[in-house]
């Protein structure tokens, strides 16, 4: 794992966008795995700026998002579909048919999750997977547990995650209790991984990730065995 520590959120976001832009330039028809949450917002903003300046082109890029609340409607302003449209897709020249986000309205999650993984495979796998990290060390919505899921699946959210994500909802009761998420196997099959972390509240998770144990109670620690991971964090997340 390569660790890059930035002064602050702004520097981290610009560096993240440059890495993603580099991937787009080197493989214009590549597959990006994308993440939501407040952490990647700055990187998406910078990517839009690079696009507006004619430096990157999304016309042949395909994307697969990590996760989505369940159940949730796509036009709910807290859905990850809505987030991605607002923060990236509506502002760049990506083709609608090249965007994939797990549906928060799946009728048969077991079958449709399997289809999601099959689509990723069929497209040739993810070239660069962008990740945030939960305060409890989750990636996507792979929550801490005694064992971890390999494939995309429907999962229950932990109290910690519901609490942490309630800041975006009118009340904690409105936070969905479940989500669809890529599994750890799906994430680990990405050729490259870029994990972003900003702020003191991510320090504990980052400290575990940089420690010497792989612990299913901190799912991100599985990334230690991936051959090509960059951890891009700010000083606050690194030092606490
Ligand atoms: C959510 C998402 C994760 C994200 C995490 C951290 O639970 N499922 O993909 O990494 O929140 O979010 P934030 O960046 O807002 O701290």
Image (cartoon, grey):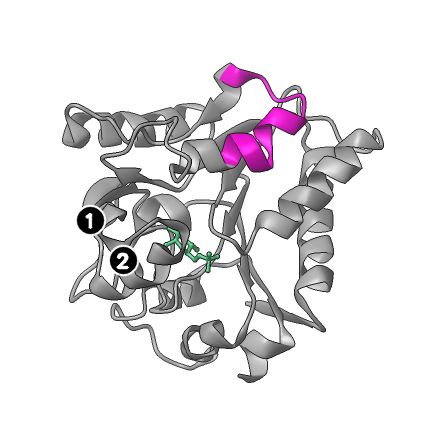
Rendered-image quarter of ligand 1: bottom left
Residue drawn at (52%, 77%), measured in percent from left and top? 200
For mark 2, does the 10 Å Cα neighbourhood hold few (<14), some (14 to 19), or many (20 or more) residues? some
Residue drawn at (21%, 60%), measured in percent from left and top? 158
Foreground residue among 35 and 146: 35
Dividing the picture into quadrants, the one containing residue 90 is top right
Q: Which residue is mark 2?
A: 162
The magenta stretch is: 84-96
Task: Specify whether 150 is left or right of 9.
Answer: left
For mark 1, does the 10 Å Cα neighbourhood hold few (<14), some (14 to 19), or many (20 or more) residues? some
Is 179 drawn above or below residue 125 in the view shown? below
Dividing the picture into quadrants, the one containing residue 108 is top left
Reply yes or no: does residue 94 show up in magenta: yes
Q: Is residue 101 visible?
A: yes
Q: Position of residue 228 (x, y in %)?
A: 55, 57
Q: Given the current orientation, which residue lies at the most extreme bottom position? A: 239
Q: Is residue 125 visible?
A: no
């Amino acid at each position: 794992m390569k660790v890059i520590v930035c002064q602050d959120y702004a520097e981290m976001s610009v560096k993240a966008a440059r890495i993603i832009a580099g991937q787009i330039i080197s493989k214009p028809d590549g597959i990006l795995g994308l993440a939501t949450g407040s952490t990647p917002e700055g990187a998406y903003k910078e990517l839009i700026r690079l696009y507006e300046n004619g430096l990157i082109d999304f016309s042949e890029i395909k994307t697969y998002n990590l996760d989505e609340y369940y159940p949730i409607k796509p036009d709910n302003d807290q859905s990850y579909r809505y987030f991605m449209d607002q923060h990236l897709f509506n502002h760049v020249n990506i083709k609608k048919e090249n965007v994939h986000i797990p549906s928060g309205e799946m009728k048969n999650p077991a079958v449709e999750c399997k289809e999601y993984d099959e689509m990723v495979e069929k497209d040739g796998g993810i070239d660069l997977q962008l990740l945030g990290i939960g305060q409890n060390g989750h990636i996507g919505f792979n929550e801490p547990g005694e064992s971890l899921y390999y494939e995309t699946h429907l999962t229950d959210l932990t109290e910690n995650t519901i609490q942490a994500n309630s800041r975006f909802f009118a009340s904690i009761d409105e936070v969905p209790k479940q989500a669809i998420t890529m599994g750890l196997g799906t994430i680990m099959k990405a050729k490259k991984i870029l994990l972003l972390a900003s702020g003191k509240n991510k320090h504990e998770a980052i400290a575990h990730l940089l420690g010497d144990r792989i612990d299913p109670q901190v799912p991100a620690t599985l990334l230690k065995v991936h051959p090509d991971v960059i951890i891009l964090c700010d000083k606050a997340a690194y030092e606490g």
